[in-house]
Image (tube, grey):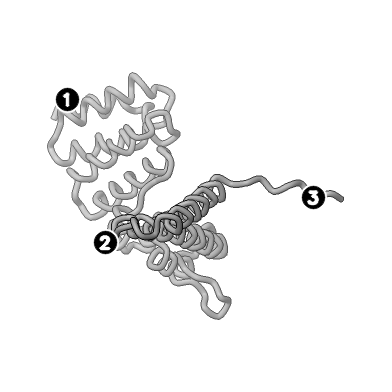
Amino acid sequence: MLRAKKKISKREIKEDKLVTSYFEARQWYDVNRKRVNMIAGIVVAAILLGWFYLNNVSANNEKAAVELAGIFSYYDNGNYQVAVNGMPEKNLTGFQSIADNYGGTKAGNMAKFYLADSYYNMQQYDKALEYFKECSGPTDFLEASRLAGVAACYDVKGDAKDAAEYYEKAAAKSPKGPNAADYYFNAAQNYAKSNNKDEALSLFKKIKEEYPSSDVARDIDRYIAEVTAS
C-alpha cells in the first residue's frame, strides 16, 4: 500500500526559513568579511539562537504531550494522587513533574491546569489556586474553566468577594458555553454573601432574561425576591 506523502507543517516551514536565512547571512559574511562589524555578527548569532530555540521548544512540547497522555487516564478516573505524582515504577510522569519541567510549553501549560484541578479535588486549595493562576486556557471555554477554578478556590476558602468576581469573569469569557448560567449563578450567590446586593440582583435578573432554559433559572424568581427583600 502506498503511503500518503507527509504534509509539511508550519513549524517545519518556519525552521526551513530560519535555516535558509542563516546560510544567506553566512554567504554574505564570507563575501564581505572585512566590512562585517560586531553588529552583523550578533545578527547571525541571533538567527542561530532562534533556530535552536524553535527546535528545543518543539521537542519539549512533544515530550510533555507524550507524558501528559500517559498519565491522563489516572486523572480521568479520579486517581488524583497518582495523576499528580506519577508512577516511577511504571515510568509514568505525573502532572507536577510535567508542569515543573515543561511549564513553558503548550502541553506543560495544560499539565498545570490538570494539576490545579487535581489539587482542588484533593482539597489542597492553596496549591490549586496557585496553579490555576499560573496556567492559561488555550480556548475561551478552557479559559472560562480556569477562571471558574480560581473562583471555586476562593469560594471554598470563604473569600466570597473574589469568588464572585472570578465566577463572573468565567461566565463573561464564554457566555454561550454550557456552564455560563451556573457561573453567573455562583457569582450572584457570592455577591449576596459579600453584601453586594446590587450586583447579585443584576446577575439573577441576567440569568432570568438570557438563560431562561437553564437549570438555575427554575427558581430564579425566589432568589430575586430574597435579595430584594433583604
Q: Mark 3 or 2, which is nearer the eye?
A: 3
Instruction: Determine whether the residue tagged by mark 3 lies in a helix, strand or loop.
Output: loop
Q: Quadrant of residue 40?
A: bottom left
| Alpha carbon separation for disc pair 3 and 2 | 51 Å
**Residue 146, position in %: x, y?**
36, 47
Residue type indicated by callout 3:
Arg
- For image coordinates 35% across by 60% down, the residue present is 34
- Is residue 169 positioned above or below 134 on the image? above
72 relative to 215 in the view: left or right:
right
Q: Which residue is mark 3?
A: 3
Which residue reaches farthest top?
A: 209
Q: Are marks 3 and 2 in contact (CB under 8 Å)?
A: no
174 relative to 24 in the view: left or right:
left
Callout 3 crowding tier (Cα within 10 Å): few <14, some 14–19, many ≥20: few
Instruction: Determine whether the residue tagged by mark 2 lies in a helix, strand or loop.
Output: helix
**Residue 163, position in %: x, y?**
24, 45
Does the rendering let one see residue 114? no
Callout 2 crowding tier (Cα within 10 Å): few <14, some 14–19, many ≥20: some
Q: In this orientation, which residue lies closer to the viewer: 68 or 72?
A: 68
Which residue reaches farthest right?
A: 1
Q: Which residue is mark 2?
A: 126
Give the mark, 1 or 2, whose residue is nearer the N terminus: 2
Q: Point out which mark residue 228 bears.
A: 1
Instruction: Determine whether the residue tagged by mark 1 lies in a helix, strand or loop.
Output: helix
